[in-house]
Image: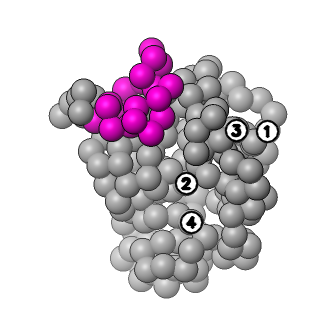
Amino acid sequence: MDFDTQGNRSALIMSFPQLGTDGNFSVNSAETAVYNCIAWAMNVTNCWVDHNRIAGHWWPDGVERNLTPNALVHAFEAVGFELTDDYAPEFGFDKVVLYKSGSCWTHASRIVSKGVEHSKFGSLWDAIHSSNVFHGTVYGDAYACMKRAKSDNHLTADAITESAGRAQANLQRLIALLKKP
């Protein structure tokens, strides 16, 4: 199904005007409130990942629950990412960019290729875009790049069941989702 319609594009351009002139911009999914940009960047598509203690949300055990940029770095570290200064794609690794506005983290996206990222926009669509489109928007600016070796499963049973109270069946669904390309 083609999600890169004028209506979908226009809705995102209203919030992020730079997308309107971005030659890399394309909408790639249906809208869903099941997962957010942080989950998307972690390769999780069955729950919302953030610091709030809300049903259906998940946050790694032992990571401070706040909006400081360091808290988001620590959340990504808890699922196997490490900081890197290299924003270029690297064979065998997933790479993400973390964004902040002021003193609060705001967004995370996957690096697709040099200068191109793949983001999930809240409960809306996911889209491909150039790396510089968020400057001056509510997402602010990139403050960290992180990488993780590609793997079938990054979240352990303990991490999911302890912090989110999920049953074993939910863990199996998560593992299946993580195995999808």
- Which label's residue is closer to the chain start, 2 or 3? 2
Which amino acid, mark 3? Ala
Amino acid type indicated by mark 1: Thr
Q: Amino acid at mark 2?
A: Ile
As drawn, the residue found furthest toward the left would be 1
User: In the rendering, which numbered label is found on residue 109?
Assistant: none
Residue labelled with disc 3 = 142
Q: Are marks 2 and 4 in contact (CB under 8 Å)?
A: yes
Pointer 2 residue: 38
Q: Amino acid at mark 4?
A: Asp
Residue 106, x across and y down, in percent: 61, 52
Q: Is residue 45 visible?
A: no
User: Secondary structure beneath disc 1?
Assistant: strand
Magenta part of the protein: which range? Answer: 8-28
Label 2, label 4: how far apart the Cα atoms are:
7 Å
The residue that mark 4 highlights is 50
Q: Earlier in the sequence, mark 4 or mark 3?
A: 4
Chain-order first, disc 1 or disc 4 = 4
Using the image, tell me which numbered label, if any, was put on residue 84.
1
